Image (cartoon, rainbow, N blue to C red):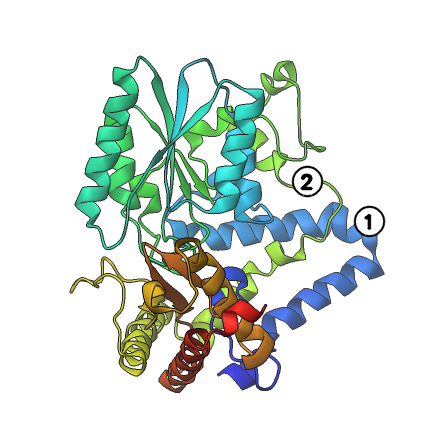
């Protein structure tokens, strides 16, 4: 699979799909064909062909989310989508954004930057894995109650479908329901959502906002502009003469002059996933299996364990596995309390520098953990290779090499 359909360099072991992903040769060829069409007839393609293909791509992705086509638009990345939503909302004194300490860093920085120019304040709900979904929801409810007890307004909550680190599935459905009950705007960072977990029930769960940018019809009036603001923007007076849902879709059709061909590749990507991989369910089943089996393999090689547990019904499953490394900071010669992050970073940086791979590694809750992404182009043998790499790096760390950087 890896050699036949993807463009990885010979000898490179892609264990970190979760960060940047990749796409198959077939989709790359289609994108290049679109780019050539753009160069051949720039005005014809960008003014007339592109909008039609964009609508087709939106129509193709909507069923994967269980939503209407007019409720989904494309943005370049999740960070752009988060900025789009947060910077369109209005805030007054006493408004609070609730988030979990597992939030993606760029999302937190966005919220904090908005706090510089608006009255919005942020409040963290601290959790540590392994923690149950019920406990997460309970802590969220308690946080909302605490905000209200201080005479403030829990304006919105931002949380994930699947966490970046540790790579764990989050109880986003239950949190959306809690938000609805408590009168809190629910905003989901779904960067690890589409193509990773089943989202065909998203329309039924009905969060207020979801990135990729899904905005239910009821909330589209809240989105006034894109970021950056571009040709789709209309003044409030002009918007009164338009259908609100038409305005939302038109806003995102052309946002500055940039290469938007990746959006147009969605149908080709879905066709590859169906024709070559057997469809969405088959992909999920394999990725979750290889993550679980690979995690067990890694833990056996390292003599440690995997973070969290997977439920029998698959409700906790995702394509990440998190493995504890056999390192104890207290037993590393010369290591101090603050060196955990430094040592983890040393291990992480050595993986591309010397081993032709990349394995995210963090010092989390007093222990060293690595996250590996399951994907259709990986086998158990690849996880065995990863285990040997990590075992060797742990031995090198014990020998004090981390101090030589």
The answer to whether residue 264 of the structure is visible from this angle is yes
N-terminal of the pair, mark 2 or mark 1, is 1
- Which residue is identified by label 1? 43
Residue 362: percent from left, percent from top: 42, 60
- Badge 1 density bin: few <14, some 14–19, many ≥20, Cα 10 Å: few
Q: Residue at x 19, y 37 (%)?
A: 138
Number of the front mark, 2 or 1 = 2
Give x and y (percent) for residue 404: 57, 70
- Residue identified by numbered label 2: 255
- In the foreground, 134 or 272: 134
Within-10-Å neighbours for mark 2: few <14, some 14–19, many 20+ = many
Kindly identify the residue that appears in the image at 39 percent across and 61 percent down: 196
Where is residue 209 drawn, in percent x and y?
Answer: 43, 36
Q: Determine the residue positioned at 21% across, 63% down.
A: 309
Q: Quadrant of the C terminus?
A: bottom right
**389 versus 322 height, above or below:** below
Q: Secondary structure at mark 1?
A: helix
In the rendered image of this protein, does residue 64 appear above or below residue 123?
Answer: below
> Residue 283: x and y, percent?
38, 70
Apparent side of residue 261 relative to residue 112 in the rendered image (left or right): right
350 left or right of 165 in image: right
Q: Is residue 243 visible?
A: no
The residue tagged with tag 2: helix, strand or loop?
loop
User: In 3D space, how far apart are the residues under numbered discs 2 and 1 (Cα atoms)?
Assistant: 16 Å
Q: Is residue 60 above or below residue 176?
A: below
């Amino acid at each position: 699979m890896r050699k036949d359909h993807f463009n990885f360099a010979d000898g490179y072991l892609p264990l970190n799909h979760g960060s940047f992903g990749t796409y198959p040769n077939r989709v790359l060829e289609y994108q290049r064909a679109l780019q050539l069409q753009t160069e051949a007839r720039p005005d014809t393609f960008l003014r007339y062909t592109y909008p039609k293909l964009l609508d087709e791509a939106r129509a193709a992705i909507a069923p994967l989310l269980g939503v209407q086509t007019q409720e989904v638009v494309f943005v370049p990345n999740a960070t752009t989508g988060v900025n789009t939503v947060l910077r369109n909302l209005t805030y007054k004194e006493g408004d609070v954004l609730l988030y979990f300490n597992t939030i993606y860093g760029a999302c937190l920085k966005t919220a904090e930057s908005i706090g510089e120019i608006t009255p919005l304040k942020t409040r963290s709900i601290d959790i540590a894995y392994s923690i149950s979904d019920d406990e997460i929801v309970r802590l969220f409810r308690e946080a909302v109650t605490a905000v209200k007890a201080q005479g403030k307004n829990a304006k919105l909550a931002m949380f994930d479908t699947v966490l970046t680190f540790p790579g764990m599935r989050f109880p986003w459905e239950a949190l959306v329901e809690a938000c609805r009950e408590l009168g809190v705007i629910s905003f989901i960072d779904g960067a690890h959502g589409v193509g990773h977990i089943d989202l065909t029930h998203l329309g039924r769960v009905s969060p207020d906002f979801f990135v990729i940018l899904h905005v239910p019809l009821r909330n589209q009036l809240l989105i006034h502009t894109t970021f950056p603001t571009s040709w789709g923007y209309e003044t409030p007076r002009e918007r009164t003469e338009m259908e609100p849902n038409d305005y939302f879709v038109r806003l995102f059709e052309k946002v500055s002059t940039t290469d938007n061909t990746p959006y147009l590749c969605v149908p080709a990507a879905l066709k590859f996933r169906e024709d070559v991989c057997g469809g969405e369910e088959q992909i999920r089943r394999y990725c979750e299996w290889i993550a679980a089996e690979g995690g067990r393999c890694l833990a056996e090689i390292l003599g440690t364990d995997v973070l969290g547990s997977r439920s029998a019904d698959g409700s906790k499953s995702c394509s990440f596995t998190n493995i504890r490394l056999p390192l104890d900071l207290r037993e590393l010669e010369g290591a101090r309390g603050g060196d955990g992050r430094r040592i983890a970073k040393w291990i992480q940086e050595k993986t591309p520098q010397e081993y032709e791979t990349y394995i995210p590694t963090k010092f989390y809750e007093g222990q060293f953990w690595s996250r590996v992404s399951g994907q259709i182009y990986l086998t158990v043998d690849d996880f065995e290779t990863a285990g040997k790499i990590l075992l060797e790096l742990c031995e090198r760390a014990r020998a004090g090499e981390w101090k030589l950087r």
